[in-house]
Image: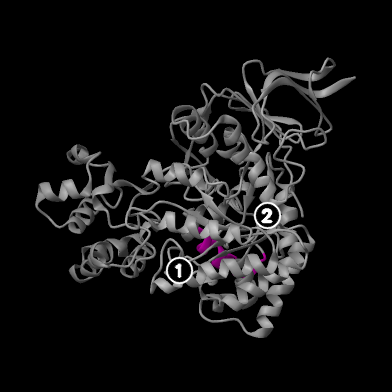
Amino acid sequence: MSYDLLLKGGMIYNGAGTPGVRGDVAVQAGKIVAVGQVSETARHTIDANGLAVAPGFIDVHTHYDAQICWDPLLTSSCWHGVTTVVMGNCGLALAPCKPEQRQFLVDLFSRVEGVPAEVLEKGVPWGWETFPEYMDAVQRCGPALNVIPLMGHSALRTFVMGRDAVEREATAAELAQMQEAVREGMRAGAAGLSISRSPAQVGAHGEPMPGKVATHAELIALCDTVAEFERGFFEIQPKILFVDKEEKEREEDWELLRIIARRTGLPTTWVGILQQWDQPQLWRQMLDKTDQALAEGLPIYPQASCRNLLFRFTLDGVATLFDDMPHWKQVTAAPVEERKRLFRDAIVRNGLRYDAVEDPIHRAFSKRWDLLYVAKATLQKNKQLEGKSLVAISQAMEKDVVDTFLDLALEEDLKTGFDTVILNGDDEAVRTMITHPAALVSLSDGGAHVQLLCDTSYPSHLLGYWVREKRAMTLERAIQVLAATPARVMGLHDRGTIAVGKAADLVVFNPATIRPRATETVNDLPGGNARLCQGAEGIHCTVVNGTVVTQDGVHTGTYPGRVLRG
């Protein structure tokens, strides 16, 4: 017998958390058909001697909803052993959508997910209205990786209510229409529903996300509708990390998670367990709440990142870091020339200073100006400032820190590059979060914030930094975290482990060398726009549905992925 593909002589980590065993993996018709010592030949044999063979990694948090239209290879995820991605997170999706609502969704997606509107306008072909039609369109794109589509609550609400979705509660009739749209999507194989309640996410003109306007009763009713199908999962961004009024909002939204998980019995994932500078113990408090929920039998799982989240921005771009600050969001939503005028206005600056320095409310930006650095100056005379914090620069100049920030940016036509680690700056906190048994390690945001950050390399980072260098977990446990755990939570019974009969989603890598490469800027977005990309060292090949997609970082020209329905 001759197989389609044979991975020969590797150390097989089956995803169950057990140590590796040397052997072979044979593939036929997209399925694993033999594991162990295989004597037969294959049309394509890969020498895996000295390498690890693992189930393909599953990224539970991406925003490739638009990028898949022009980049079905789904870079950069494809270079890091990822074989399946979940998209439609944070309540955002590109369907359902009536033709007259397209610009509204483009503006919302652009603002919240940091993709220039021009890119979306040039790169998204539309041609769909319902969510089933969108899933069909994604399959026609011919993705290289498998795609799990979540319905986004913001799109559902806009589809039924139009622009009123950001203004008011839904009527009973409108809720019924949303429920029917959910049923339509679930019947076609949608994976479930995503919701965002985050005050840090706002629309193109500073308006709230539709999900933040919705009542808890509406959200529970929509989740109940998903549960009618006795499958699926939820992804919810509650008011946990940031609250814009009172602490009780955090408790109310945590109780919302508990109610949804209890009523539906379906996995309820939330964004996310992250360390913050200005709330140093919040992550621990939320882990304690997670433990309590799990002890009560509630299927609640926090999404976690294994990376420190370095946010890079310029003030002439989409600087979403400040979007949950009342004065800032009005200014940064303005056109660039108007933005410059407002930044110069002394009265406006007073409001910006209050938001970014004095306001006691916790925001996405921690107000740690000592951790905000000049990354790239455009004028030669300012090159000396690169690598210095705004606090250090302002002290040297004997100026107010906000004045220093804005004056420098204005002098350089708002093109000064700044960066700051906004989350996960404490390694010991990150170690505890990612080793929690319920954590879903991901939060890559693939397809989003494309000019600001690139966290799609999290599998290579976990295996290189946290396993090899820090020894925070064993290699077999890390592979379980990257593949089997998300597969189990999301009900992907045929993926996430290496066993006969399972789908042949596989990754072959060198544990001694795997790591992310340096981030680079490429100009390959529609319209020639720039984005950040990041490759990997040490990944020999990635296999999707039995077909090799990348080998030594090079695309083989194949696109074997598919939309995983229901």
Q: Which residue is mark 2?
A: 149
Q: Is 322 rendered above or below residue 542?
A: below
Closest to the camera, between mark 2 and mark 1, is 1
Name the residue at 56% across, 70% down.
256
Separation of disc 2 and disc 1 at Cα? Answer: 28 Å
Q: Is residue 544 left or right of residue 364?
A: right
Which label's residue is closer to the chain start, 2 or 1? 2
Name the residue at 44% across, 35% down.
519
Nearer to me, 227 or 528: 227
Name the residue at 42% across, 69% down.
206
- Residue 440 rendering spot, x and y as whole percentages: 57, 48
Q: Is residue 197 left or right of residue 148?
A: left
Q: Is residue 189 found inside the magenta-colored segment of the image? A: no
- Residue 279 rendering spot, x and y as whole percentages: 35, 58
Q: Quadrant of residue 378?
A: top left
Magenta stretch, overall SS: helix
Q: Is residue 104 found inside the magenta-colored segment of the image? A: yes
Name the residue at 44% across, 52% down.
274
Q: Quadrant of residue 247?
A: bottom left
Q: Which residue is mark 1?
A: 250
Nearer to me, 411 or 75: 75
Q: Which residues are magenta?
A: 96-110
Few, some or many residues within 10 Å of mark 1 (<14, 14–19, 20+)? some
Quarter in which the N terminus is drawn: top right
* Circle 2: residue type: Pro
Inspect this view and state whether residue 396 appears: yes
Few, some or many residues within 10 Å of mark 2 (<14, 14–19, 20+)? many
Q: Secondary structure at mark 2?
A: strand
Inspect this view and state whether residue 550 appears: no
Q: Is 368 rendered above or below residue 358?
A: above
Furthest residue toward right: 1
